[in-house]
Amino acid sequence: MDVQETMISISLLIFSGQPDPEWTLDEQAAVPLAERVKKTLSGEQVRTEPVGGLGYRGFAVRTQRNVLDLPTEFTVYQDVLTVEPGPKATHWRDTGGVEDWLLGQARERGFGDLLDWGGARKRPIAET
Amino acid sequence: MSWLSDFIRRIIEAVVQWISRCIPQYEPAIWNNDTYVRRCNNCYNYACNIRTDTFAQPGFGSGNQYQQINCGDVGAGAVADGLAAIPDDGNCGCRDCCHKVALVIAPGPYVTDFHWYRLDRDGKWSHKPGQTAARNTDNSGNLITDPRTADRGPYTVFCGFYCVCKERRLTIGGSKPSWC
């Protein structure tokens, strides 16, 4: 499996016209993310996802393959994680703190002002 | 003479239907249900009702992409692509198969962005914020009857209205982002 296939890409869903900021994690760096996702997906399922508006709308996470058993595509916003957005989506209460962790990642990467502009909540990650 | 009034009514209905055919229906599933379509088409694609899967940028398709994000530059890029600016109280007419769209800006100073709305056949406005789903509600969850008065979050500057006309040259496009 080549390096590209094990990378996890994360989009900060915040812009409307311009492309969103994006970064990648390698498999090792994504272990905390995978643990949180696993916890969320073993918890409470909910019926719908929050819609959001202009400004901060959460994160989209994509992998080429099921790296670390992560879904190939999911979004998380307002404490709801959605697997395979679309008509076959499933929604889960984010009990694993996936969104918080991603917010911390985004702030560490210098997107704090952007998050504040977009109305994202300010919450430090509990652990790295 | 009831046949005459009935005849006139049918003519008027046919004309209205003819004009309405050019105005997009609000059918968000077309843009939302396929994940690739949803993430690769942005507000500009949606407002123009043209899917390019390249996250279109005003002016890119015509070789005149905006340099700065402000009403003038982004609007000029859209005009170069084939959109036509109209006065606030203007309409798009019925000759060139047009529908009405609106441009707004998040003016900064630290963060700038643009956003587009479109007027649908049901008389309401809808929009598609970036990679996320198309919807007809604003940031307060209200149906959008006028983008000038809708809750637009940080997109506080209303730039103006434009017409997207199928029977004029339209060339919208973008540089495909990595997630497409």
Image (cartoon, rainbow, N blue to C red):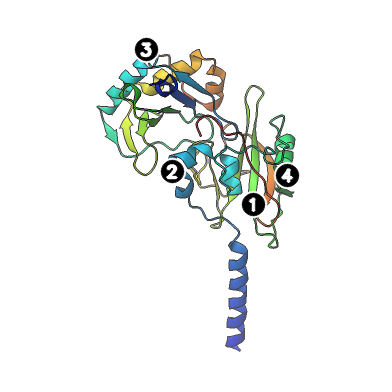
According to the image, label 2 marks what residue? B34
Disc 1 to disc 2, C-alpha distance: 25 Å
Question: Would you place residue B122 above or below residue B178 in this image?
Answer: below
Disc 3 to disc 1, C-alpha distance: 48 Å
Circle 1 Cα neighbour tier, 10 Å, few/some/many (<14 / 14–19 / ≥20): many
Is disc 2 in the same subunit as disc 3?
A: no
Is disc 4 in the same subunit as disc 1?
A: yes
**Res B168 seen here:** yes
Circle 2 SS class? loop
According to the image, label 1 marks what residue? B100
Dividing the picture into quadrants, the one containing residue A34 is top left
Q: Position of residue A117 (x, y in %)?
A: 56, 24
Circle 2 Cα neighbour tier, 10 Å, few/some/many (<14 / 14–19 / ≥20): some
Judge left or right: residue A79 versus residue B58.
Answer: left
Q: Position of residue A125 (x, y in %)?
A: 40, 14
Judge depth for marks 4 and 1 and give the one in front.
Answer: 4
Q: Earlier in the sequence, mark 4 or mark 1?
A: 4
Circle 3 Cα neighbour tier, 10 Å, few/some/many (<14 / 14–19 / ≥20): few
Number of the label disc, if any, that sits on residue B79: 4
CB contact under 8 Å: marks 2 and 3: no
Disc 4 to disc 1, C-alpha distance: 13 Å
Q: Earlier in the sequence, mark 1 or mark 2?
A: 2
Circle 1 SS class? strand
Chain for disc number 1:
B
Judge left or right: residue B176 versus residue B135.
Answer: right
**Res A122 seen here:** no
Q: Earlier in the sequence, mark 2 or mark 4?
A: 2
